[in-house]
Image: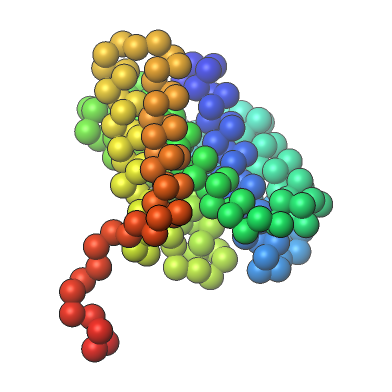
Amino acid sequence: MATNYVVVDLVGIAAFALSGALVAVRKPLDIFGVLVLAGATGLGGGFLRDVLIGATPPASLMDWRYLMVPVVAGLIAFRFHPVLGRLESKIAVFDAAGMGLFCVTGAVKSLDYGLEPVAACLMGMVTAIGGGVIRDLLAGRVPVVLREELYAFPALLGAAIAVTAVQLDLPYAWVVLPGALFAFGYRMIALRRGWQAPLPSGMDGY
């Protein structure tokens, strides 16, 4: 992946790692638990993507920066959680930011490894939701993507925008920014307005 996309990948890892670390602090877990949850959240989606597309060993095991970013993010959250935690929405903001960035980098890297556009869109979505699923499972919560909240759909649309931009051979900024901002904005608006995915009908009696 080009250097520019590595930078975006690392920023996404930092955002996801902060969300995982803040969840760990609220459990509350000790410093080891905070670092584990930060690492699993920040690296989980990219690790899964790399294994599925055959980019092995995964980038997180080949580049020391991929390992250091979640460690630093975890330590920051552990030390400054009173400041970061004053607004409960911070977790959702960091999570949405990581999702927006990862859906783009996941899709672009999948294209680089020869996947067709539709498959690359799906891999972008997997990259975006993988870390959050691992975080929630380790924290003993129902994963966000399995609730009625809109999460995977914005990631899929953001990945589709990035794939379309690559297919049109647009410059770097036009590949990264529209897809990432769209996915992030869609997720935040959905949270603010309470948009939800459809639920099965006739569940009142259960």
Taking the image as drawn, is residue 34 in sight?
no
Res 19 visible:
yes
Question: Residue 11 placed where, x, y %?
Answer: 59, 32
184 or 44, nearer to the observer:
184
**Residue under the point 39% across and 20% down:** 175
* 17 horizontally vs 84: left or right: left
Relative image position of residue 169 (x, y in whole percent): 31, 11
Residue 136, percent across and down? 51, 62
Quarter of the image holding residue 135?
A: bottom right
View extreme (left): residue: 202
Q: Can you say whether 135 is above or below 110 in the image?
A: below
Residue placed farthest to the front in the image? 193
Q: Is residue 87 above or below residue 52?
A: below
Residue occupying image coordinates x 71% and y 57%: 86
Residue 147, quarter of the rendered image: bottom left
Name above or below for residue 182 compared with residue 130.
above
Q: Residue 40's spot in the image, x, y percent?
A: 57, 51
> 37 above or below 125?
below
